[in-house]
Image (tube, rainbow, N blue to C red):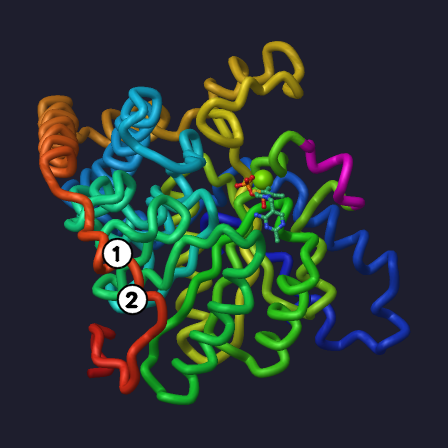
Amino acid sequence: MAASKSTSANKSTKKASPADKSISDTKGRAAASKGSHVSRAKGKRPSDRLDKAELLAIYRTMVLARRFEEHVIEQFREGILPGFVHVAIGQEGIAAGVGHALHDDDYIGSTHRAHAHIVARGSSVEAMMAEMMGRITGLCQGKGGSMHLSDMSRNVVGANGVVGSGAPMMTGVALAQKELGTGRIAVAFYGDGASSQGNVHEAMNLAQLWKLPVLFILENNRYAESTPSWQTVPVEDLAVRGAAFDMKTLAVDGNDVLSVFDTVAEAAEFARSGEGPVYIVAETKRLSGHYVGDAEVYRPKGEAKAARSTDPIPAFRAELLERKVPERDIKAVEAEVEETMEQAVVAALAADAPPAEDAMKHVYAEYPYAGPVRGID
Ligand SMILES: Cc1ncc(C[n+]2csc(CCOP(=O)(O)OP(=O)(O)O)c2C)c(N)n1
Ligand SMILES: [Mg+2]
């Protein structure tokens, strides 16, 4: 295995008798997964096959997600963008690594912190920004906003304000893929806070029982709102929870985009081949507040500043240079992203709100459903 270390309970307990599956076994696995977050294993990795254009595409996704959210913050502070907004600044390594490792027609289900995941699926940033501003040109015709962004043309089942609910929803999507034999997989993103929710555990249990093609991707930023995870989670290493379901488990440094890419590539292959779900724990840092406007008084002094040293974007930029990607090409990507985002904001600002008479439209699905679901219709 390449980028991350497997803590697969499947492998390590296959020959063990029930009595052997003891606390010490679990502890052993916890120890095995420690340290696997930080270093990359040597040897061939799927990302070694990425060419310059593909590496730059990953970098573009990260920068586009960052600039999208910086524009969102600006428009929110201006009072133009309504609602309640959570940004994932600092967590783009996970979004981009996952987005680029998936097949184009795989499915994702996101959280309240969804923008980067959706940018990484290739949704239009113009339509996303318009949605955030409540404009008719938005992804959901301006009726969803940040926490209900969805884009079925990109198989983005949706952002979701109900913490942890992506796990059962995407388990259902995975069940559909298995039943229909599509060969596609489903991804459920969730946070360390959500990881203690009962419905997440129920979903993981059923997914493993039925060997469903779903990846449970835990973005471990170690905060749920203002509460640090040590106050709510009794285990130091969240990867050990995979053992409860005998589920293949991978731990990865979420700030290292190529490690995320490699980990998800491995997991996706496993799930796609019918072997069952994979649980991925990606360590990261939330470089912003829980929501835009959060005073972060709960954070120990200096923590936020120190976390900036793990920012995945400058780290990957430096890696591109090391890999001999010319700086002028990197700068060209950055300039193109600036222009794309400027245009997205201008276009969203110029668009109209949906008409009042449409307020009750799209509240309930109309059956038979005639909307776009790629590959099935
Ligand atoms: C079912 C449910 N419970 C509580 C909340 C309130 N809430 C919103 S975000 C959040 C914290 C989630 O933390 P985590 O899962 O770690 O995600 P992060 O915010 O770190 O991305 C909570 C408790 C909610 N939206 N839904
Ligand atoms: Mg969290």
Within the magenta stretch, is there residue 334?
no
* Residue at figure coordinates x 36%, y 48% from the top left: 117
Residue 140, numbered circle? 1
Residue 230 visible in rendering: yes
Residue 28 placement (x, y as % from top left): 78, 53
Q: Provide the secondary structure element on which disc 1 rests.
A: loop
Question: Disc 1 and disc 2: Cα gap in Å?
Answer: 9 Å
330 and 91: which is toward the camera: 91
Q: Which residues are magenta?
A: 227-234
Q: Amino acid at mark 1?
A: Cys
Q: Amino acid at mark 2?
A: His
139 and 249: which is toward the camera: 139
Quadrant location of residue 90? top left
Which one is earlier in the sequence, the residue at label 1 or at label 2? 1
Quarter of the figure that contains the C terminus = bottom left
Q: Provide the secondary structure element on which disc 2 rests.
A: loop
Crowding at mark 1 (Cα within 10 Å: few <14, some 14-19, many 20+)? many
Q: Are marks 1 and 2 in contact (CB under 8 Å)?
A: yes
Residue 51 visible in rendering: no
Q: Is residue 182 above or below residue 85?
A: below
* Residue at numbered disc 2: 362
* Residue at figure coordinates x 27%, y 65% from the top left: 361
Residue, far top: 301
Residue 184 relative to residue 244: left or right: left
Q: Is residue 9 above or below residue 197?
A: below
145 and 160: which is toward the camera: 145
